[in-house]
Image (tube, grey):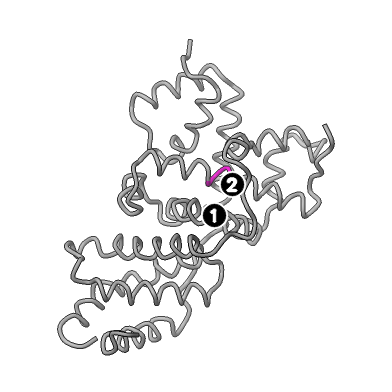
Amino acid sequence: MAGVTGPRFAALTLPHLSALYRLALRMTGDPSAAEDLVQETYVRALRSFAKLREPARAKAWLFQILSHLVIDRHRSSPREVPLPEDDELERFSLYERIADEDPFPYSDDVHGDFLAEFHDEDVRRALLAIPEIYRVPLVLVYVEEMSYRELAEMLGCPLGTVMSRLFRGRKALERELWDCARRRGLVKEWPR
Amino acid sequence: MSRMSCDEAVRQFFTYLDQAMSATALQEFEQHLEECLDCCDKLEFSRRVDALVRTRVGDAPLPEGVEDRIRQRLASAATDPEE
């Protein structure tokens, strides 16, 4: 970092390194991939540093670069596991599936007992399994507690799109948790 | 009598949990909840799923050496435009 850009860039951006890494790890699920993503974010940020008009927005600006990198990578590589059609996904209700299957017939709190079965790794994997276009806003809400307005600004889309992505993201997450429960034999899907 | 249907209420769950509802929508949503125990139960479950994810994704401390490697990468990126 030659010249005056280096120290100023470092002073404005490196205090946010831990937050960026945390976000990258939740987006990628892998420490090595997370570090690569953070490095790429910093290199891109350095190259477009002149565009940062408000130094107070440095963190949001870095998050924006990282989020777009994640979404753009997804666009250039087809997903291995396709999601169900829009309508089917939006109608999916984990609450109703649990009530229908009743995996703990003697429980007073079948829904609570169902959720208590999940380990940290199950939840992280479920989050990683949903498409990036939904995972990015969801992780920003869960990990960084971002508001819808901040998300809309960061992702460059209307508030309605943010709401729709968060709704579908949560539905996709519920579905992944259900699939995880099936794989682990916690529930069976009886023919109806 | 609430004008909001259960399907409409369910679509609003996450906006409500994320505290992103407008005052008008919030009033209508809460009115629906006052009259619909089923939606109250479903909303409570959604709140528990949210809490599960928030607590299980947890913090991720920065591993040792990452900052040094980023500083090195930035130094080489600044001197090599093709990097």
Amino acid type shown at disc 2: Ala
Question: What numbered label is drawn on residue A131?
Answer: 1
Disc 1: CA contacts within 10 A as few (<14), some (14-19) or many (>=20) = some
Q: Quadrant of the C terminus of chain B?
A: bottom left
Chain letter of disc 2 in the image: A
Main secondary structure type of the part rendered in magenta? helix
Q: Which mark is residue A156?
A: none
- Which residue does the image show at 67% across and 46% down from the upper left? A115
Query: SS class of the residue under badge 1?
Result: loop
Q: Earlier in the sequence, mark 1 or mark 2?
A: 1
Q: Evaluate if marks 1 and 2 touch, with contact meaning CB atoms under 8 Å apart.
A: yes
> In the rendered view, does A147 fall on the left or right side of A70?
left
Left or right of residue A105, residue A22 in this image: left
Classed neighbour count for the residue bearing mark 2: other residues with Cα under 10 Å, few (<14), some (14–19), many (≥20): many
In this rendering, the answer to whether B1 lies above or below A132 is: above
Q: Position of residue A111 (x, y in %)?
A: 69, 39
Q: Which residues are magenta?
A: A169-173
Relative to A29, is A118 on the left or the right? right
Residue shown at the point (47%, 72%) measured from the top left: B61
Above or below: residue A15 compared with residue A68: below
Query: Front-most of A13 and B37?
Result: A13
Mark 2 falls on what kind of element? Answer: helix
Tell me what residue is drawn at x 45 percent, y 40 percent.
A164
Asked whether residue A60 is drawn in magenta, I would say no
Q: Which residue is mark 2?
A: A172
Residue A39, image x, y percentages: 40, 77
